[in-house]
């Protein structure tokens, strides 16, 4: 999360939208997310195109999208929203965990996905985690997916506009492995607040809204290769 988004989240409720073509599913998400401290549900959509138009209009901090929706599915909607509203984080909501689909979700710009049978406590944990720029995915799963993404991505020259300082590159490599800010601070012998600042700078320089997408973007830009992620 960039510093502006972080301070906005700290100062006032984060603005959420939900999209699902099933009324009961939307009602369930609405019930779990409404009236929660620090969160404000600002809109709902019943298909992918409605979700895109809604996000374009209200510019939410986070969108929860059903994987299977008419007109535009979750992946296509995710790509479109991230293209028009890059600061909006996205969580895909699905019935079944599928590693292949998760890889496509990461490529599309999602912070990750959650299962529809998730408890309210776990859903809120995931939502707040993404809003803080954290990864909500299992570190081992993410590491494997990023290794695969790196092996599939053609080697390219590092983009001049995305250059990171040596310390930021160190932090990026560690967060790619699923390390928390506290763990990174301990390894680099710096304060947690210093790590938070580095992470904010990394997200801002890479133009992403969360740690998972920072790793994906770094691979796409040639900043990370498989050997640096082991």
Image: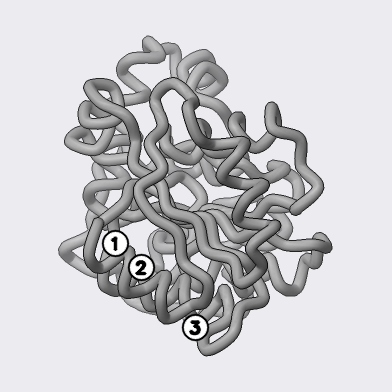
> Residue 167: x, y in percent?
32, 34
Residue 184: x %, y % from top left: 50, 24
* Residue that mark 2 sits on: 82
Please state which of the two labelled residues, at mark 1 or mark 3, is closer to the viewer: 1
In this orientation, which residue lies closer to the viewer: 48 or 90?
Answer: 48
CA gap between label 1 and label 2 equals: 4 Å
Q: Position of residue 59 (x, y in %)?
A: 25, 56
Residue at screen point 59% across, 32% down: 124
Asked whether residue 25 is in view, the answer is yes
Q: Which residue is mark 1?
A: 86
Quarter occupied by the N terminus: top left
Q: Judge the density around disc 1: few (<14), some (14-19), many (≥20) Cα neighbours within 10 Å.
A: some
Upstream in sequence: badge 2 or badge 3: 2
Helix, strand or loop for disc 2: helix
Question: Could you tell me how far apart the alpha carbons at marks 2 and 3 are, in whole angstroms?
Answer: 23 Å
User: In this orientation, which residue lies closer to the viewer: 1 or 9?
Assistant: 9
User: As drawn, is 84 to the left or to the right of 227?
Assistant: left
For the point 33% across and 47% down, which residue is it? Answer: 61
For the residues labelled 1 and 3, say whether their Cβ atoms are less than 8 Å apart: no
Question: Would you call the spot at circle 2 few (<14 residues within 10 Å), some (14-19), or many (20 or more)?
Answer: many
- The disc label shown at residue 154, or none: 3
């Amino acid at each position: 999360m960039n510093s502006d988004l972080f301070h906005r989240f700290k100062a006032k409720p984060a603005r959420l939208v939900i999209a699902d073509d099933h009324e009961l599913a939307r009602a369930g998400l609405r019930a779990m997310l409404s009236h929660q401290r620090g969160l404000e549900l600002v809109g709902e959509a019943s298909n992918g195109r409605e979700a895109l138009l809604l996000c374009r209009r209200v510019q939410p901090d986070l969108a929860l999208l059903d994987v299977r929706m008419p007109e535009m599915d979750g992946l296509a909607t995710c790509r479109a929203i991230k293209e028009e509203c890059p600061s909006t984080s996205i969580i895909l909501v699905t019935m079944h965990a599928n590693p292949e689909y998760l890889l496509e979700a990461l490529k599309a710009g999602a912070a990750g996905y959650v299962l529809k049978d998730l408890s309210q406590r776990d859903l809120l944990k995931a939502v707040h985690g993404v809003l803080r720029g954290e990864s909500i995915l299992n570190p081992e799963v993410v590491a494997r997916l990023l290794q695969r993404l790196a092996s599939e991505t053609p080697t390219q020259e590092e983009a001049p506009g995305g250059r990171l300082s040596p310390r930021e590159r160190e932090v990026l490599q560690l967060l790619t492995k699923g390390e928390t800010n506290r763990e990174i601070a301990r390894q680099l012998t710096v304060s947690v607040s210093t790590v938070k600042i580095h992470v904010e700078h990394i997200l801002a320089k890479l133009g992403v809204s969360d740690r998972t997408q920072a790793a994906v973007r770094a691979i796409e830009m040639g900043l990370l290769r498989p050997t640096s992620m082991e």
